[in-house]
Image (cartoon, helix red, strand yellow):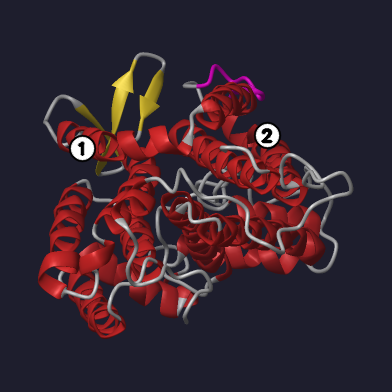
């Protein structure tokens, strides 16, 4: 599929770097009096707030039984709710800080942030430094909280890929000069992620990085060849890894081993079945009572399906669809105003949220093999929520600068 908003083949160096001299073009939408209808995209804001608030309520509902039955939480039913609320407050605070930072500054910081993310991915693999949970070494312990570098790397990858594409736009048609350096970098990041292992994050980051390159005008033939090679590579990774292969077989027929390989998926499907059209009622889920593992993280949508039914799931899907659609609209508008870095970042964030939410929903519904990916903006997890909020802050900044340009300002 060819997304709207791909960049033109060649741009002048100054415009390609910052687009600082761009101004509104004839036909820009203005409200009476010569100003945009509003300072920010209200659909974008309300869809994001809706997902955050629904997530807060459903994390509490899905985690009550786990919190009450664990000595780790002090048997406090509100343990995960309070932590999620704190992470959400921190995330919104950092999102506001991100919004205050001009996109030109984000472009300057993009390479340094990407390098910092790579360093964190290396540090987390050091024995005794990275924290291991359920056989995966993905976290850095920072006192009362754990940092998951792969979550931060998603936003860093979107920023870096956008900056790289704008800098290399004149040679994006060349495999060796334009495409190969980025491929080597992403493969190195993938090696670090697979060493944790975090296959889900690797998939998301790969799609975001190369999706931005495609939107930026990379040679289509090269992109198709890469897509074919990526599919073959992922198949090899799955086949050569016993636990990934088991997940595939469990996904194909979860009922064959419902108490083993297919345990999570079978109980997720039971939750969807019990919910029917309107659900059993908020707080009424049975599957969250120690049947469905990771109910408040990876399988939050299954609890939503059981308690709020098909209608509740469709509301969540619709909110994600609106959010991703508006992200691409914001990106396309930035590109139209010749702010190419901003436009690619906005569309990269849209790709990130869209791909990750699609994978998580597909896993919950049995359409995709089980992956350790949370539902963006909704699932419990400090690093994920903070990264999502920072991404939203940057996305809103792009939108705000677009509207300032349409006013005739500097953005």
Residue 328 vs residue 20: left or right? right
Q: Where the C terminus falls, by quadrant?
A: top right
Where residue 236 sits, quadrant-wise, is bottom left
Question: Tags 1 and 2 in contact by the CB under 8 Å rule?
Answer: no
Residue position for label 2: 60
Q: Secondary structure at mark 1?
A: helix
Q: Is residue 251 above or below residue 47?
A: below
Task: Examine the residues drawn in magenta and state their main secondary structure.
Answer: loop
Q: Is residue 196 above or below residue 243?
A: above
Residue 392 vs residue 404: left or right? left
Where residue 310 sits, quadrant-wise, is bottom right
Instruction: For residue 241, say whether it is visible.
Output: no
Other-residue count near label 2 (Cα within 10 Å), few / some / many at <14 / 14–19 / ≥20: many
- Report the residue at 50% width, 46% height from top: 294
Q: Is residue 253 above or below residue 134?
A: below
Residue 55 vs residue 131: left or right? right
Other-residue count near label 1 (Cα within 10 Å), few / some / many at <14 / 14–19 / ≥20: some
Magenta range is: 73-79
Is 76 colored magenta in this rendering?
yes
Q: Name the foreground residue: 21 vs 88.
A: 21
Residue 115 is labelled as 1
Disc with the residue nearer the chain's start (1 vs 2): 2
């Amino acid at each position: 599929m060819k997304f709207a908003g791909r960049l033109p083949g060649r741009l002048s160096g100054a415009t390609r770097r910052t687009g600082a001299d761009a101004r509104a073009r004839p036909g820009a939408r203005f409200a009476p009096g010569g100003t945009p209808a509003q300072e920010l995209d209200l659909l974008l804001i309300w869809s994001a707030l809706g997902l955050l608030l629904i997530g807060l309520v459903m994390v509490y509902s899905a985690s009550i039984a786990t919190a009450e039955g664990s000595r780790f939480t002090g048997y406090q039913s509100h343990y995960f709710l309070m932590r999620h609320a704190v992470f959400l407050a921190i995330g919104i605070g950092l999102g506001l800080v991100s919004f205050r930072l001009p996109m030109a500054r984000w472009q300057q910081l993009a390479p340094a942030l990407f390098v910092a993310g790579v360093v964190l991915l290396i540090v987390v693999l050091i024995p005794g430094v990275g924290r291991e949970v359920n056989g995966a070494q993905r976290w850095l312990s920072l006192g009362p909280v754990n940092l998951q570098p792969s979550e931060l790397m998603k936003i860093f990858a979107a920023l870096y890929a956008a900056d790289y594409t704008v800098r290399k736009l004149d040679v994006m048609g060349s495999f060796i000069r334009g495409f190969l350096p980025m491929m080597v970098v992403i493969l190195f990041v993938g090696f670090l992620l697979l060493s944790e292992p975090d296959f889900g994050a690797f998939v998301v980051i790969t799609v975001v990085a190369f999706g931005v390159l495609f939107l930026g005008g990379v040679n289509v033939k090269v992109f198709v060849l890469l897509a074919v090679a990526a599919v073959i590579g992922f198949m090899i990774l799955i086949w050569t890894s016993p636990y990934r292969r088991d997940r595939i077989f469990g996904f194909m027929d979860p009922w064959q081993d419902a108490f083993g390989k297919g345990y999570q998926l079978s109980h997720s499907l039971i939750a969807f079945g019990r919910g029917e059209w309107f659900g059993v009622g908020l707080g009424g889920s049975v599957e969250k009572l120690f049947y469905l593992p990771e109910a408040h993280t990876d399988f939050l949508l299954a609890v939503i399906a059981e308690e709020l039914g098909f209608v509740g799931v469709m509301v969540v899907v619709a909110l994600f669809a609106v959010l991703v659609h508006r992200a691409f609209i914001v990106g396309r508008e930035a590109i139209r105003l010749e702010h190419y870095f901003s436009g690619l970042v906005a569309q990269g964030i849209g790709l990130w949220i869209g791909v990750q939410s699609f994978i998580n929903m597909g896993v919950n519904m049995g359409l995709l093999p089980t992956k350790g990916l949370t539902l963006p903006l909704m699932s419990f997890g400090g690093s994920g929520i903070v990264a999502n909020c920072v991404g939203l802050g940057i996305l809103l900044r792009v939108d705000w600068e677009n509207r300032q340009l349409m006013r005739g300002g500097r953005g």
